[in-house]
Image (tube, rainbow, N blue to C red):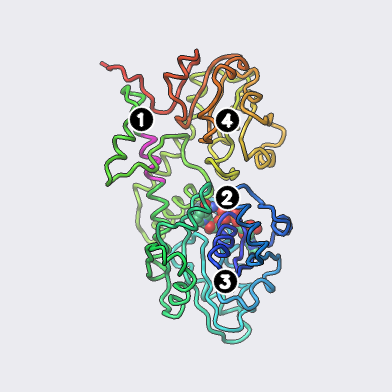
Amino acid sequence: MKITVIGCGYVGLVTAAGLAEAGHWVTGVDRDSLKINKLRHQEAPFYEKDLEPLLRRHLKTGRLTFTTSLALGVANAQIIFIAVGTPALSDGSVDLSQIETVAAQIGPQLHGYTVIVNKSTVPVGTTRRLETIIAQHTCRPVPFDVVSNPEFLREGNAVYDFINPDRIVIGTDSPQARRIMEELYRPFLKKKVPLIQTNPETAELIKYASNAFLATKISFINEIAELCEAVGADLPTVARGMGLDHRIGPEFLSAGPGYGGSCFPKDTKALIHLARSYGKQLSIVEATDAVNTRIQKAMLAKIIRILGPPAGKTIAVYGLAFKANTDDLRESPALSIIEGLLQAGARIRVHDPKALAAGRKVLGDKVTYCADEYTAAQDASAVVITTEWEQYRRLDLDLLKTKMAQAIIIDLRNLLTPEQVRAHGFLYEGIGRGSKQKVG
Ligand code: NAD
């Protein structure tokens, strides 16, 4: 099928490459000419595991092309995907300006029946609103349908998740659009991926409810971690004990510095806002959001409690990205920790395997960027692990100790084994790792 994807960010680009891999002919459109230039030169504009080889493959097969021209990009497309940003406004509501602009631009380009598929995360009611906007901008009456098709990929595993989704959700009342969407996803449906066909409102809410639930799991386990520290219990063991219950499951039970990224913070707030606009209160989601804000602040306090006043001290921060296997810094807990430590007068040396370039754009020359963990640890009074990159599990602790001014590791991702780190002469503090001693 001939497909156009508008918006070549984390979701759009993975969608474009994934659909080319499934055998479709795909044009990616983005208004950012730097991004499109990089793509034309076979370079991914951001780091996402396995994405660049896939892009290269389909730029070569010719199944994938890129343009900055929306008019050229959508010409003759049977299906137009929208995957532009839907950031949060200060009151928690969603800024729909990007998606509404795109809808207005698509209208005049429609000439025959077209399915417009929205992949951006949007409040309930937006799919129908897009229908109205597009209809207002067509040159003459022309048939089209707008379908809600939320995306559930995880950054860092986005390519795998797109190609192996847990489910495909299609929200439309139009039988014709449903048939076309089934045809589009046939290579996936052949692999027995569950398909949910529903109305747009349900599809839109499935996305927000899923993200709010996952965020709730994280805030829940972060509070349990605080309790573990108070009572002398070990959070990873508690989480394992919980996760082996198949009704709970092991995923999203890792305690940490609070959730970040471009989705959970904004999507929980958007769901709360949506519910309030209907006179409803989602108390659990509100608590999830409040706990996350509190946990993020508590991380800074924890570091200062262990390290003492940071003024004049050098601190090595391991990880800038909001999670491993991406260079995405949006709402990254590492950034707020770094800003807090800088304000308290610390000098910061940072390492991240993939996000140093992205970090430079945000932090400028306020911190020192280091190519490896041991350079970052030079003269440091503490190493603070902020992102769960696998390589931080395999630190050479003896070498690390020779570099540091003080042997302290504050492991905000519980990557290391406390006993092992302490055996190397470090003061070690993780999250929720109580002493396991009987408390009175
Ligand atoms: P992003 O910011 O990485 O990408 C958006 C892209 O859209 C940018 O490249 C931007 O230049 C482009 N764009 C904006 N306006 C445009 C226009 N008028 N014409 C052409 N291009 C335009 O965003 P993202 O992370 O890919 O997220 C996109 C949507 O998907 C959001 O609604 C988000 O909530 C949702 N989502 C994101 C994820 C994720 O993990 N990032 C997962 C699921 C859903």
Sequence-first disc among 4 and 1: 1
Residue 80 is marked as: 3
Let me know if residue 68 is in the magenta part. no
Q: Amino acid at mark 3?
A: Ile
Quickly name the residue at label 1: 235
Proximity of marks 1 and 2: CB atoms separated by less than 8 Å: no
Q: CA distance from mark 4 to mark 1?
A: 22 Å
Q: Which residues are magenta?
A: 215-223
**In front of the other: 368 or 269:** 368
Name the residue at 61% across, 86% down.
140
Disc 2, SS: loop
Residue 248 placement, left or right of 122: left
Disc 4 and disc 2 in contact, CB within 8 angstroms: no
Query: Residue shown at 33%/28% (left/top)?
Result: 227
Left or right, residue 425 beside residue 68:
left
**Residue at 62% in and 22% down:** 377
Sequence-first tag of 4 and 3: 3
Q: In which quadrant of this rendering is ligand 1 seen? A: bottom right
Q: Secondary structure at mark 4?
A: strand
Q: Label 2, on which residue?
A: 50
Query: Is the C-beta of the residue carrying label 4 under 8 Å from the nearest atom of ligand 1?
Result: no
